[in-house]
Amino acid sequence: MQQSSRERTGPRDFKKFVYPTRLQFNLNILFSAKLVLIAGRFSPSVPDVTSSAEGLDLSEPPLTCNPLENYPMTVTYPTGGLMPNGEILLCGGYQSPEGVTLDVCFSNAGLSSSWTPAGTMANRRIGATSAIIDGKLWVTGGRSPSAGELVATEFVDTSGTVTPGPDLPEAMVYACLVQIDASTIFIMHQANTYFFDIPTQAWTPGPTMATSRRDFGCGVMTDSDGSLFVVAAGGYPTGSTLTDTTEFLSLRDPAALAWVAGKKLKLHTDII
């Protein structure tokens, strides 16, 4: 079996990027080939930072963060994505200081645009997670004030159309998911993992994570030999104590899937 450069030299060290507003807790980072959206919950110097966002334009060097128009309300734990048409779509979350879990969605066409209403979900959701499927935002799980932790999912598009989606295999809140390829979603909730086949909408259990996590970051990467691996990092294993641990799942051999510990983060963090 070909040995990858990551296996020969070890995982890469984590590096720090500084952006203008000091955001802490509940960072929400959405990215595409041209744009990185950074939205955060709390800043020591800007108390109302929950409604602020910054965009990093990858197509126009030098790389600098530019402010977006403020979100229509102060909110933590929304979910969203960068849609195929270039618009940003965000849904749900917890409105402060009103103390309301939201069911509304808003879209933004880019760095120079305003936020506009983009539909109302069937469920109020905080701590949901999402992916883009067939040009729509697939919103999964989260916690509802009336129904508790949710198995229900729904599809939202930028025109405001909302339709129900397939149920999750278990109720999930503060989970993390990645899209492996055009037909496969991989979702992680605490220590449980599942593969979702988009064409058949069937769920298959995956390997148990080494660390049970909530409010954590995840991603999918390509190794030097072309194989894919999933990374999970940070978050809360138990209670309110953050972890600096990471772990990797190589998808090279589907018959031998197992999580492997990675290098520790430079900082203890959540939702990276």
Image (spheres, rainbow, N blue to C red):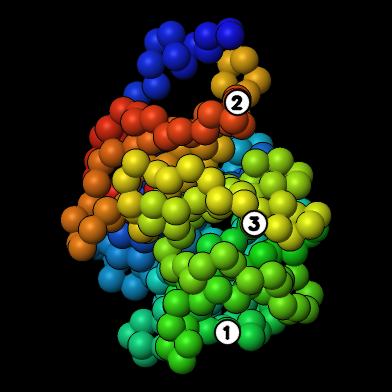
Q: Does residue 51 appear anywhere in the picture?
A: no
Question: Quick one: 107 or 184, which is closer to the camera?
Answer: 184
- Type of amino acid at the residue the image marks with label 2: Asp
Q: Find the distance from the CA under tag 1 to the CA under tag 3.
A: 22 Å
Q: Position of residue 265 (x, y in %)?
A: 29, 35
Tag 3 secondary structure:
strand
The earlier-in-sequence mark between 1 and 2 is 1
The earlier-in-sequence mark between 1 and 3 is 1
Q: Is residue 232 above or below residue 166?
A: above
- Type of amino acid at the residue the image marks with label 3: Trp
Q: Decide: marks 1, 3 in contact (CB < 8 A)?
A: no
Residue in the image at 49% along x and 71% along y:
171
Q: Quadrant of residue 59?
A: top right
Residue in the image at 35% along x and 29% along y:
262
- Type of amino acid at the residue the image marks with label 1: Asn
Q: Which residue is mark 2?
A: 253
Q: Relative to residue 224, is residue 265 drawn left or right?
A: left
Q: Which mark is residue 203?
A: 3
